[in-house]
Image (cartoon, rainbow, N blue to C red):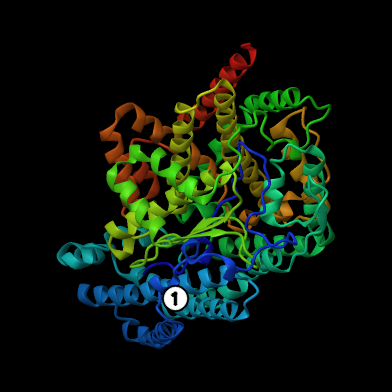
């Protein structure tokens, strides 16, 4: 009965690129400036996919087994209401199939992402996508049949059969969405069409990660380097402004060149979401997306409105940046470079592991021991190599298998924070998978970004506490401000843009490349204020951000950031009682609705307080920074 989600929900892609330092290093690259091939990397820095399957023959055996089981669902059709025993038998059968399905999906997806030019793994991944569709069609009768059981009878089943009682929360969630569940024939049709609906995202992902060709530019030393995703972000931290601008403008060339193709994919994705929402009788795609996790739409509205009412700290931060950098005009490529360069400009992976282990000690001995297990047993794929998927993610919960983390290490402090972030996801998935039975051994996207940003907050606290100079403290305060501006304000900006484009499309109005650029530029200007010069390149950011294909995902970065700030504050203030509540939060999975899981941890995300607390925190940090700058 586990829903057959798309792979997006299993892989938490991180768009947070924050650093204290702008040094661009090429230690993992060849002499020509090209990315190093994977076979030149030591195995200890690479995933051990044998923890999933020892051989690809084992993968194929499970794949074939799942295909055969798809036909055996027929034995349950029309019988779920006959008895508690029959309903339980069907649910257990579905769990067994789903566990293996997620396992084969994990293997093929991870193998594919290590080198997107290897067609074998693309093919395997496509096979899994089709298998999801086949299983979706085979199980499409389950929800309608469960909903056809009279509630009195269903409650009797759950009460009298102890084993079936395990599924009470899951069944309650099905009943809750009764109005949006279709008759079984239509549910089967929706499952059959699902691979087609994934085409916009899959095509965009392949274009952005494998097919796109970036130009070459001169680096700080006059050497030719080809721009890549990793080098783009690294360059934005460079102290050489001309180099930053060259890479920034060069990076957007292919997005501008293929604007019509990307606009078509972008529109296709929006129309996919609208189709799903209308088919399931929702008023909007946004309502449909939030209802999946039972999130009140007021949580989204409150976030956007409260942030819009409190943009002054962002405008203040832009003014400080411009003045301290001593530049006539502030551009996007100036917003990442540090105002306070640190002497520590080379963070290898070993140093990153050491810092995270020290910083996360407040989580307790077991948490640290489990982190060490992940580090020492190749759960993390570290370096950027030819064809490897860009960015960073944790693979999420796959029952019976530990989670994996993908990185593209670039030797900056930002990479240490990305490591802490992804290991937050990793431990969340690990604890959930080890604590909850399969029906609840996952967590909602709404909760996903809390554990990750909590780790970042603790790392930042550790570094600030151990700062030895005024400049170092200023640099760390700057880091905190950048965290807030990129994770809280920027993701809310994305959420506002996403809401706008969906509403326009739902009205039947056209979204052209020109109109998308105009609106994105308008919102970007509003968030950064009058000090910012919005270059044409920046207006094309909508064309390169994969999160816009994730169906109202991004607002949860902002709510997650607010929640993590509140939870880490409780840990620092209350000690062990707050730690215990936090660890219980990591273990809760889907045993309750996400809003209720957070209430158990001591937070009410339906109120404005967590959002306003972040605004207050940013103002306090700006006050402290300005006071330190006044000191001689």
Q: Quadrant of residue 483?
A: top right
- Of residues 160 and 398, the one drawn nearer to the viewer in this rendering: 398
Residue 362, image x and y in percent?
A: 34, 37
Callout 1: SS: helix
Snapshot quadrant of residue 120: bottom right
Place of residue 131 in the rendered image (x, y in percent of width and height, measured from the top left): 49, 80
Please count the marks in the image: 1
State the residue at coordinates (30%, 77%).
Answer: 93
Compared with 347, 395 (above or below) is below
Give the side of residue 276 with respect to residue 394, left or right.
right
Q: Position of residue 115 (x, y in %)?
A: 61, 70
At 32% from the left and 82% from the top, the residue drawn is: 76
The quarter of the picture where the C terminus appears is top right
User: Residue at 62% of width from left, 79% of height from top?
Assistant: 119
In the visual, does 241 lie left or right of 200?
right
Residues 400 and 284: in front is 400
The residue tagged 1 is: 104
Instruction: Name the residue furthest front.
Output: 31
Point 72% across, 23% down: residue: 324
**Rendered position, 365 above or below 179:** above
Dot 1, crowdedness within 10 Å: few (<14), some or many (≥20)?
many
Classify 559 as above or below 395: above
Expressed as whole percent of the image width and height from the top left, the position of residue 134 reads 48, 81
Task: Look at the image and tell me whether residue 81 can be seen.
Answer: no
| Residue 488 visible (yes or no) | yes
């Amino acid at each position: 009965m586990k829903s057959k989600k798309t792979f997006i929900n299993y892989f938490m892609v991180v768009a947070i690129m924050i650093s204290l330092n702008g040094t661009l290093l090429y230690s993992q690259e060849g002499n020509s400036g090209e990315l190093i091939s994977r076979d030149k990397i030591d195995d200890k820095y690479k995933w051990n996919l044998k923890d999933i399957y020892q051989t690809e023959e084992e993968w194929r055996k499970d794949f074939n087994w799942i295909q055969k089981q798809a036909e055996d669902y027929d034995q349950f059709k029309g019988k779920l209401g006959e008895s508690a025993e029959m309903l339980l038998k069907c649910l257990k059968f579905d769990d067994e199939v789903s566990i293996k399905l997620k396992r084969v999906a994990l293997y093929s997806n991870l193998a594919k992402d290590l080198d997107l030019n290897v067609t074998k793994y693309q093919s395997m991944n496509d096979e899994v996508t089709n298998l999801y569709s086949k299983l979706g069609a085979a199980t499409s009768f389950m929800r309608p049949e469960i909903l056809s059981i009279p509630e009195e009878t269903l409650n009797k089943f759950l009460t009298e059969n102890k084993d079936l009682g395990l599924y009470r929360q899951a069944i309650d969630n099905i009943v809750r969405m009764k109005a949006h569940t279709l008759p079984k024939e239509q549910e089967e049709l929706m499952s059959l069409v699902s691979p087609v609906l994934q085409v916009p995202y899959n095509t965009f992902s392949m274009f952005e990660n494998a097919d796109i060709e970036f130009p070459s530019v001169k680096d700080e030393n006059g050497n030719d380097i080809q721009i890549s995703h990793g080098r783009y972000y690294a360059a934005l931290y460079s102290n050489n402004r001309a180099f930053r601008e060259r890479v920034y403008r060069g990076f957007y060339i292919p997005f501008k060149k293929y604007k019509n193709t990307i606009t078509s994919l972008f529109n296709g994705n929006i129309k996919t979401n609208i189709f799903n929402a209308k088919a399931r009788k929702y008023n909007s795609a946004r309502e449909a997306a939030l209802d999946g996790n039972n999130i009140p739409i007021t949580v989204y509205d409150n976030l956007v409105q409260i942030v819009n009412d409190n943009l002054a700290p962002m405008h203040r931060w832009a003014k400080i940046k411009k003045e301290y950098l001593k530049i006539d005009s502030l551009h996007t490529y100036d917003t990442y470079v540090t105002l306070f360069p640190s002497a520590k400009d080379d963070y290898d992976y070993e140093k990153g592991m050491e810092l995270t282990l020290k910083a996360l000690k407040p989580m307790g001995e077991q948490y640290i021991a489990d982190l060490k297990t992940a580090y020492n047993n190749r759960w993390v794929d570290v370096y950027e190599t030819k064809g490897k998927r860009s960015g960073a993610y944790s693979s999420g919960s796959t029952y019976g298998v530990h989670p994996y983390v993908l990185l593209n290490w670039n030797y900056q402090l930002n990479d240490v924070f990305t490591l802490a972030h992804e290991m937050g996801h990793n431990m969340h998935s690990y604890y959930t998978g080890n604590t909850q039975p399969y029906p609840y051994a996952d967590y909602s996207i709404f909760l996903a970004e809390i554990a990750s940003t909590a780790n970042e907050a603790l790392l930042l606290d550790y570094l600030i506490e151990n700062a030895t100079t005024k400049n170092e403290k200023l640099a760390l305060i700057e880091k905190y401000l950048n965290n807030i501006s990129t994770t809280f304000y920027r993701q809310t900006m994305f959420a506002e843009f996403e809401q706008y484009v969906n509403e326009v499309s739902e009205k039947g109005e056209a979204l052209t490349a020109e109109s998308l650029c105009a609106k994105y530029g308008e919102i970007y200007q509003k968030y950064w204020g009058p000090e910012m010069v919005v270059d044409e390149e920046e207006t094309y950011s909508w064309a390169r951000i994969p999160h816009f294909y994730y169906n109202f995902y991004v607002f949860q970065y902002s709510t997650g950031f607010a929640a993590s700030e509140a939870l880490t504050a409780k840990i620092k203030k209350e000690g062990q009682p707050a730690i215990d509540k936090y660890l219980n939060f990591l273990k809760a999975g889907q045993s309750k609705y996400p809003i209720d899981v957070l209430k158990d941890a001591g937070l009410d995300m339906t109120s404005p307080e967590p959002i306003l607390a972040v605004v207050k925190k940013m103002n306090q940090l700006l006050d402290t920074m300005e006071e330190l700058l006044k000191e001689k």
